[in-house]
Image (tube, rainbow, N blue to C red):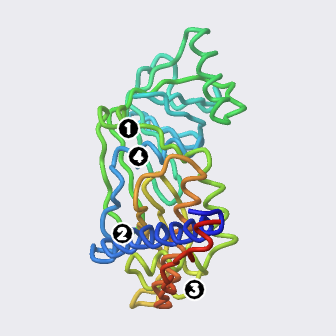
Amino acid sequence: MTSLSRPRALSIGLSRARARARARQHACFAAASSAPSLGPLPLASSARARNALESVTEGVLCALDAGNAASCQFVCDGASMLVDVEPSRAVASADMLPAKVCLHANARGKEACVVGIATRVEDEAEVEEARKLMKKRRVDKANGTMLRIVVDRVTVSAAGSPQEEVDAEAFAEAERDPLLDCAEDIIRTFNEQRPDDVAAFCRAAGVNVTSGDDAEVVDVDRLGLDVAVRTLSPYGIVENTIVRVPFERAVNSERDARSMLTMMAQVVWENERQYVPPQIAPVTVPDDEESS
């Protein structure tokens, strides 16, 4: 094959690759449309609980027996939670620890609640390590009383979906999502710059959304998007429902996720407009070109 025919062959190869990619995306959205649109999200409950608690660092800590509550900062640490509370607002005095506590947090359209046993971190070296971990997770003012909560169970709920409960073992085994550190940037991009794509994703998932003003991305993980859709109830009340928009496959980086979303937007655009890509005629190379 001569140098003149190589670009043509490459063009044909790329066109066929794009056609195969579109076919896979069409199959993905067809499966999503045939399933109940507002049913349980496909991400495992344990992963959803882990993602919710890893994506925020502020919450409210309550001592169940004493009935006290205080705002706090926290990070996940394996099967436990490290919690920093101002000494003046401690939910339980030192002589009351260990104590059964509940940690509440709102994160990206979800409400998470951790129930467990809290003990005070006394060892200075352990406190220092805890503060280093908090600083790494962007908690800069961790200078209060350090507590460790050994998780007993976690519940997580979202609008339009039933509450789910995760036991300690499943929570401990759930891995940190690869998009956690870049999720906010992806969410901001689509809500601020590509709202029409967000609405189109919801339509592809079987939910009729006509305007980007009625849909907002609230979370993104390796398996898909969570979109809050505003609907009007029969009583004239505006309600938010979380719609799951699945990816064709798991993504493993911000670049991978953005590429996947761009491909999805293109496929939805073609589907809604019944776009048929032009057929490329076979290319034949004249004999004089082959011999040159």
Q: Are marks 3 and 2 in contact (CB under 8 Å)?
A: no
Alpha carbons under labels 1 and 4: distance apart: 9 Å
Q: Residues within 10 Å of mark 1 (few under 14, many from 20)?
A: some
Of the two numbered discs 1 and 4 in the rendering, the one whose residue sits closer to the viewer: 1
Of the two numbered discs 3 and 2 in the rendering, the one whose residue sits closer to the viewer: 2
Q: Nearer the viewer, residue 245 or 22?
A: 22
**Tag 3: amino acid:** Ser
* Rendered location of residue 76, percent (x, y): 50, 33
Residue with the mark numbered 1: 174
Q: Are marks 1 and 4 in contact (CB under 8 Å)?
A: yes
Q: Residues within 10 Å of mark 2 (few under 14, many from 20)?
A: some
Residue with the mark numbered 3: 211
Residue at left 45%, top 20%?
119
Earlier in the chain: of badge 3 and badge 1, it is 1
- Residue 28's disc is 2
Earlier in the chain: of badge 2 and badge 4, it is 2
Residue with the mark numbered 4: 49
**Tag 1: amino acid:** Ala
| Quadrant in the picture for residue 242 | bottom left
